[in-house]
């Protein structure tokens, strides 16, 4: 009886390992397809052939129903211009106003993975928070520049006072 039970447990474990490998392979194939779809979207959006997609190019391409369907398949909604603009802002991690293919693919897949774990409202909130964080970082850099300029002006004023006093 124990031998039969042992053989059954071994067969079940073997089937489970096979199933895990099959699921991993399917996931890998699905990710390859998603990368291919994203690459096609990028190529279509890059109208000037610069290797980068500007906000205007991105908004233009996301107005197309077929592109909206591809993004929906990737669980990234661009059905409204506001959503498309937010998605672009998140994809443009460097805040250059244009995204290259690597930036586009990496950020879109990251958002897709994160979006699967959350509702669409949470995904939009996440996108808004990321955008706000980038803007705050930009303001902080600007303030640091202003602070540095103020220090330099203060030193110049001291020097000018010393020269006048002499």
Image (cartoon, grey):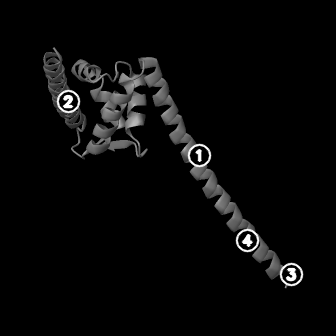
Labelled pair 2, 4 in contact (Cβ < 8 Å): no
At which x and y percent is residue 129?
52, 32
Q: Which numbered disc flags the more N-terminal residue, 2 or 3?
A: 2
Q: Nearer the viewer, residue 131 or 29?
A: 29
> Residue drawn 39% across and 30% down?
87
Disc on the earlier residue, 2 or 1 = 2
State the residue in front, 7 or 82: 7
Point out the residue furthest to the top here: 1
Name the residue beneath numbered marker 1: 139
Viewer-side label of 1, 3: 1
Specify which label sits upstream in the sequence, 1 or 3: 1
The answer to whether the residue labelled 2 contacts the one labelled 3, judged by CB atoms less than 8 Å apart, is: no
Residue 165 tag number = 3
Give SS at disc 1: helix
Give the mark, 4 or 3, whose residue is nearer the N terminus: 4
Mark 3 Cα shell of 10 Å, populated few (<14), some (14-19), many (≥20): few
- Mark 2 lies on residue: 24
> Closer to the camera: disc 2 or disc 3?
2
Q: Residue furthest right?
A: 165
Label 2 or label 4, whichever lies nearer to me, is 2
Q: Position of residue 112 (x, y in %)?
A: 33, 28
Disc number for residue 155: 4
Q: Is residue 32 above or below residue 117?
A: below
- Residue 26 location, quadrant: top left
Q: Residue at x 31, y 22 (%)?
A: 75
């Amino acid at each position: 009886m124990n031998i039969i039970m042992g053989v059954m447990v071994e067969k079940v474990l073997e089937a489970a390992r096979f199933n895990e490998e099959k699921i991993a392979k399917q996931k890998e194939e699905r990710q390859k397809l998603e990368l291919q779809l994203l690459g096609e979207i990028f190529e279509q959006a890059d109208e000037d052939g610069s290797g980068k997609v500007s906000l205007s190019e991105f908004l233009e391409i996301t107005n197309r129903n077929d592109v909206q369907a591809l993004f929906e398949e990737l669980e990234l909604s661009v059905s409204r211009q506001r959503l498309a603009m937010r998605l672009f802002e998140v994809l443009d991690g460097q805040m250059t106003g244009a995204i290259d293919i690597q930036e586009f693919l990496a950020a879109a897949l990251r958002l897709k993975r994160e979006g699967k774990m959350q509702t669409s409202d949470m995904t939009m909130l996440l996108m808004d928070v990321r955008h706000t964080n980038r803007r705050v970082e930009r303001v902080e850099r600007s303030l640091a520049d202003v602070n540095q300029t103020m220090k330099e002006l203060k030193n110049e004023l001291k020097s000018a006072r010393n020269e006048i006093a002499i």
